[in-house]
Each structure stands twice: as C-alpha cells, then as structure tokens.
Amino acid sequence: MTAYIIRRLIMAVVVLIILTLIIFFIMRLLPGDPLIIFMGRAAGQGSISPEQLENLRIAYGLDKPLMVQYFNWMGGIFQGDLGESIYYHEDVGKLLLERFPVTLDLGIRAFILGNVLGIVLGLVAALRRGKWIDTGATVFSYFGVSIPVFWLGILLMYAFGLKLGWLPVTGYTYPWVDFWMNFKQSIMPVACLSLMSLAITARQMRSSVLEVNQQDYIRTAWSKGLRERVIVTRHMLKNSLIPVITLMGIGLGLMFGGQVFVEIVFSIPGVGRLLVSSVFAQDYQVVQSGTLVIAVVVVLANLIVDISYGWFDPRIRYG
Amino acid sequence: MVKKQTIGADFSEAPVCVSEWGRFRRVFFERKLVMFGLIVLMLLVITAIFAPLLAPYDPYQSNMADSLLAPSSKYLLGTDIQGRDTLSRLIFGSRTALMVGFLTVGIAGIAGVTLGLVAGYFGGITNMIIMRTMDALMGFPMILLALIIAALLGSGIVNVIIALSVATLPGYARVMHGLTLSIRENDYILAQRAMGAGNIRAMFSHILPNALPPMIVLITLQLGALILAEAGLSFLGIGIKPPGAAWGAMVADGYRYLSSYPWLSFAPGVAIMLVVFAFNLVGDGLRDALDPRLRGLL
C-alpha cells in the first residue's frame, strides 16, 4: 500500500508540473497583450504614455524572458504569492480567498447531495430493474446529462423566482450573516449543480449494481439465507461503489464547469465568475493562478480517489 | 430422406446462430428510445442542410417594427429584440451546433486516438510524456480550458473548434491508450509481428480497427457533450460573431428579457436539450449493440 501511494504521489507531482507549464504557456503564447487592454481602460480616465506603459511592463515583470517569468511565478506561488491582478490592482491570492468560500459552500453541498441521491437512485433502480422506478430513474438521468446548466438555472429562476416568487432570484449571502437567506438563495444554484452529478452517478451506480448482482458471492450470500438488507449493505454496496468513486473524481472537474455558469446566471460572487470576467479582461495573473488552484484541487481529488480505490479494491494495489 | 430428417431434428437443438449484424439490428433498431434519438438526429441534419429552404424568414435581417413579438401564427416562436424570427434563427443555429460538433470530434478524435495509440503501443518514456500531459489537461475543467483558449484566440467559430478540440482531446487519448494496452497483448498481434509486420502496420491496421467499436460509441456520446459545451461558450459570449445564430447565444440574449419575454430563452434551450438527449440515446444504443460482453444478454 505504501509503495502504491508513493508511486501515485510521484505521478501527481509530474502531472502538476506539466499542468503549470500548460497554463503558463497558453497564457503567454496566444495573442493579446494585457497592458494594451489595461491601457484601453485607463485611456478613459486619462491617457497613458508609451513610457508609462514600459514602466508598467517592467513593474509587472512582463519584460523578462518567458522562462524567467515562469520561474518567478512558480517561486512566488511557493511563497504564497499568486501575483497581482492588473485589472483589480489587488493581490490575486486575496481575490481568490474572498471568493473561494462561496464556490466551496455551493460546490460541496451540490457534490454531497448529487452523489448521495445518485447512489441511492441508482441502487434502487437496479434492485427494482424493469419496474416503473427504474424507467423513471433512467429517463431522469438522461435529462440530467442533457440539460444545459445555464438553461436549467434560467428555467428555475423564471418559475420559482419570477413567477411564484418563492425564492430570491439572484445573489449570495454568507451563512454567518443570514443563515436563512443563505439557505433560500442557494436552493436553485445547488439544485442546478447537483443534477448533473446526480444523473451521472445514478447511471453508473445502476449498471455497477447490476454487474455485481451477477457475481457468485451474491448468489452465495442469498443461498446462505442472509436478509436482503444485509446483502445489499454488506456485499453489494461496497463492491459496486468502486467505479462510482472513480467517476466522482472526474465529476469534480465537471462540477466546477457547471459552477461557472451557475455563478453567472445567479450573480454569485464566486471563483467561476471571477475567472470568466478575468478571461475577458485578459487579466493574466488572475486566470493563471485561479486556474492553477482549481486544477490542483482536481488533481488532488483524483489522487485521493486513486488511493481510496486501492482501499476499496485491494487487487488494484498490485496492478 | 428419413435419415436426413433426423439429422435436421438434431441440429434444431443447437443454439441459434445469430450474426453480429443481426444482433446489432435487433438491439439498436428495435428499441423505441434509440429510434427516437435517431429520428431527432436525422431531422437535425436535414434541418441544417436545408436551412435556407426551411426557414420562413431571413435569420439575420433585423426588422425593428416586429421587435419582441410573442409567438403567433406569423412568427411561430416569436421574435427577438431586433425583430428577427426565432424559429429561423433556431434553424440556422443547428448549422453552428452541428459544424462545431462534427469538426471538433474529427480533429480531437484523430489527434487523441493517435496519441493514445502511440503512447500505449510504445510504452516507456513516450507513454510517460504523452499520458501525463493528457492527465494534466484533464485537470482543467473542460469548459474553463476551452474558454481561456477561445477568449485569447478571439471570437469566431474556428477558434471555438480549436479550443474545444484541445479541451476534449485527452478523453480520446485515455480511452485509446487503455484499449491499445489490452489489444496489444493478443496473439494475433504477436503473429503479425512474427510475420514481419512493422510498428505502423501493427498499430494502424490491426490495433486501430479492433478499437473502433468503443471509439465510435465514445464519439457519439462526445458529440452531445460538445454541443452542450458549444452552447455554453456561446452563452458566455464566445463563438460565432453576430448576427450569426448559435443556440447558446440565443439563450443568453433572451435571459436579458426573461421577466417579460421568457419564450426567447425557452425555445433555444429546448433545442439544445433535445439534440444532446438524442446523441446520448443513440450513443447508449450503439454501446449496447457493439459491446461484445453483452452478447447473449441483449
């Protein structure tokens, strides 16, 4: 097990290094100059001379060779310095830190809700195969993976926010400021976010349970005269969860993709919205460091998945 | 004669021999849901090809006198802020969706399959470099990576295709890599090698054809995901330049007038969902029909 974990850790480090290189070079090699964009903005408040532009370039270290810029960026990250936003004139770390709790709050709730409900739905559908609940679950999960998140958000907003007036249309309140408001405002975003992972998990869980159901050890368990509850919880659940857990790691990346849209539709001040607006403003530092933070989270989550995988299925450790 | 009859009777006890094509036809074409998906997709392709003939109005010509009309017999799905017919724009939007979907699948599929094949076949350091790079690309949420690339390249449908190709490429590479690893171990590959077949021949005329069925399924399912992603990007304001029509952009346009003119974002959303739904149905149908492990079960 230790050797397995060490091997996975080394692989994760290699992946993370390649990842930083990809982010950095995509941002630098593609056309577009952040200072020109900035100048366009500043031009409204008073013009910027070429000398000032040059001074800014030096101040942000954009005049140095690419490799030097890369190592400066990486060196900064290890010291907790994610750079400074050209657009907001603020520390990127501070900008991200303000918005991460919001994104995490909604994301974690949706992740738990989607996966727990998905596992239950998939299990029930498989156990009642061919019955109405199975058909219903299948159709529901088809819709879940087909519906565009932003459109679902708009539909919910129209129905429950504008027409029925049950829920606040947009915004986010911290739970420690107003817990009840936070709860009401997060119902629609969390519902949108969790639907896709619910659908994916339910589909995978269903086919996984059906496969486990055919195994000899399940027949043995039945013939020993065990009760259904014991067979399902002790024998079926753990074994059929393995492929579902792999998907959860991948689902995390998908979930963040959905979060970008949900934050935009519901005007939630989270990381997704910050990144999109920074992409449009060509604010290198924010996009670069923000994307890195998210990618690191995804890679680490997949690492945890891989390790827990070894625990769920001992055969994998020796693979 | 009598003897022949007894022999015939004996053979009737043997299991019925079903050809692969027969099984495919039964599993794929006789399912109502799969057929529904297939019909939707055929209608979509026809709509995209004959868009100029089918659209009742010019999708690009603004007509301020008819701005923001509700659905009526004149404009079946109403009009947008510039007085353009929503139905005509939906019909032309199918071209955008299909073009992005098919071209991206083509580019990303060919590149991804080749990378996965090379990585899996040669192994070692080649495998290490290619697959770890793919893992790193997988670390980015797909929509975010596509957004960054598309935004920095500038608007335009070609850039969306490039961005989505880069973002979806690792998926094909991973699946192909896994398939190559398992197919490579078969005896027929060893036999080919013994007969003097080179690497290129082994890879492209023996491993690749054997990996095709699962890749076809992946590609069909990916088409749905890509249409969803393209809609997402155009919702965010990246992609085809105005006045060009894209479903995601239409949802975004309608979103601004949601409280008074909700149908503006409803119709394009239904179109996106229906098409993605259809691709998923057909993809799953293909998977069941092409999966050799389900032989005898389905």
Image: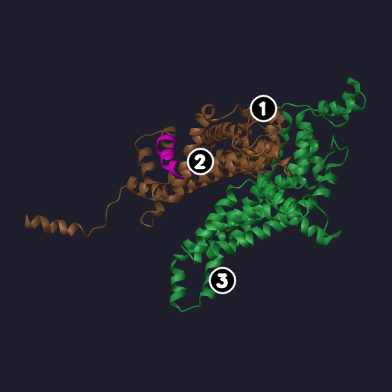
Can you tell which quarter of the image residue A66 is in?
Answer: top right
Residue A239 appears in the rendering:
no
N-terminal of the pair, mark 1 or mark 2, is 2
Q: Dot 1: what SS?
A: loop
Which residue is found at the position 83% from the left and 42% from the top? A92
In this view of the protein, which residue sits in the foreground, B81 or B71?
B71
Residue bounds of the magenta highlight: B203-220
Is B213 left or right of A247, judged from the image as shown? left
In this view of the protein, which residue sits in the foreground, B247 or B123?
B247
Query: Amino acid under label 2?
Result: Ile
Label drawn at residue B243: 1
In this view of the protein, which residue sits in the foreground, A196 or B84?
B84
Q: Dot 3: what SS?
A: helix
Circle 1 packing at 10 Å, graded few (<14), some (14-19), many (20+), is few
In x, y percent, where is residue A274?
78, 42
**Quadrant location of the N terminus of chain B?**
bottom left
In x, y percent, where is residue A273?
76, 43
Q: Colour of chain B?
A: brown
